[in-house]
Amino acid sequence: MKWALIFVSLLFTQLLAGCTGVLEETVDPRASLTTIGPTDIQQGESVTFDALKSDAIEGVITAFNWDFGDGTKTTTVGGFTSHQFMKSGQFNVKLTVTNDQGGSDSTTTLIKVNGAPEINISIPDVVRSGDIILLDASNTYDPENGVLKFAWDLNFMEDSDGDGDTRNDVDSTDERVYLPTETSGSIMGSLTVDDSEGGVVSEQFSIEIQPRRYKVSWVQDTLKWNYDEYLEQGETWSENMTPGMGVRILAYDAQLQLDQDLFMPPDNFTLSLNIIDDSHRRSSDTKPGNVTRNESTTAELNASNLNPPGPDGVFDADSEEELLSSLLNEPGARFGQGEWVWSIIAQNADPDSLIPGAPDPDSGNDWTLEIVITISRPVLTEVAYEV
């Protein structure tokens, strides 16, 4: 009887141990992971992950644990989530599902993220009108070392392809561009870079173009012309000139002198000036000099204060030519810039012959003309801006 009780006790202990082993066994779920959409994406795009086909096997799934491989982790109750990949590279996305039995299972999927090119544009710090700007994007690079394609729109204010959109032009496809400037102001444009793998990125640029700066000084000078001719009675001599080109006319003085006659009365010539654009017409008849003092017969034309003197100082302009035009075309300071016409008419050469058919004792005369024009000339020196 005693041995029977011991046998029964041992048998009960073994059966109890077997039941405890069954109760302590953990049932693992089955993880299932699919993606909605492509697994090859561009940097900054999102991928949606579907784990709804995961099976708890026994009980229910209590948690979906996501490790996206880029340093980001999250836990969801439902088996559906999205994630935006802000880094480029290849990422193993790991899903771990847990059921209420304490079991877990994991699965992974690979996401490839193409990195967008990183634009690096070098622009000069200071740009003056008239400069040629070097826009250098040669330091632009692609994380995957793809073949880069460049497309520059160099000015948002111009529609170079004529399609009505000023911001989609392709003015250059080089990595370095030389952009000429003519005027001060702002230039806005953009650079678009394509890595040939779907990665496209654009960056706008803005350039402030400053005017140039000049110191202006006005220098007074004289222009001189001398003529020595002969005119028969009734003949006319003329000469055209443009002394006002690039200067301000301040004054003029012209003196006509005839050779001394051997016979009296003296010859009568007329000196004339016509500044056409200014409707400035002047004339002077010759007057005899004092014979006893051996003075010649002369005529004279002169005028002064024709334009105000030019202003000295420092001026900003897009170019030397622009500033000169502004200074020389200032209202009230443009007299004499057009064509000047000088003329001499031999009105009479006296005396005439008193005997019909006899040779004329004075058929004409030699003369000299001196013209002196006083001008003010601008001298421009480019100066640097004060820092």
Image (tube, rainbow, N blue to C red):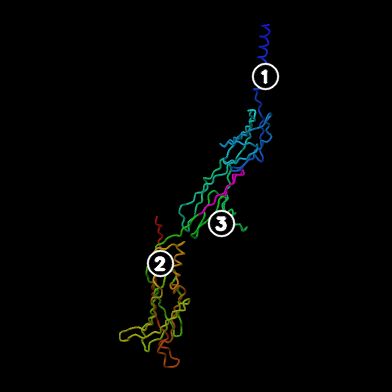
Q: Quadrant of residue 55?
A: top right
Q: How many marks?
A: 3
In the image, 4 versus 316, the foreground residue is 4
Q: Which mark is residue 378?
A: 2
Q: Amino acid at mark 2?
A: Pro
Question: Pointers 3 and 1 in contact (CB under 8 A)?
Answer: no
Q: Amino acid at mark 3?
A: Phe
Residue 162 position in % (x across, y down): 61, 58
Disc 3 vs disc 1: which is toward the camera?
1
- In terms of secondary structure, where does tag 3 sit? loop
Amino acid, disc 1? Cys
Quarter placement of the C terminus: bottom left
Labelled disc at residue 310 = none
Q: Which residue is mark 3?
A: 156
Query: In x, y percent, where is residue 222?
Result: 38, 71
Closer to us: 14 or 242: 14
Q: Give me the C-alpha separation between circle 3 and circle 1.
A: 82 Å
Q: Can you identify the residue that label 1 sits on?
A: 19
> What is the spatial separation of the Cα atoms under label 2 and label 1, in whole angstroms?
114 Å
Residue 205: % across, % down: 52, 52
Question: What secondary structure prevails in the magenta region?
Answer: strand
At 30% from the left and 86% from the top, the residue drawn is 292
Other-residue count near label 3 (Cα within 10 Å), few / some / many at <14 / 14–19 / ≥20: some
- Which of pointers 3 and 1 lies earlier in the amino acid sequence? 1
Give the quadrant of residue 198: top right
Question: Which quadrant of the figure contains the N terminus?
Answer: top right
Mark 1 Cα shell of 10 Å, populated few (<14), some (14-19), many (≥20):
few
Q: Is residue 204 magenta?
A: yes
* Local SS, label 1: helix
- Relative to 221, residue 53 above or below: above
What is the x, y in percent for residue 228?
A: 40, 77
Magenta-drawn segment: 192-206
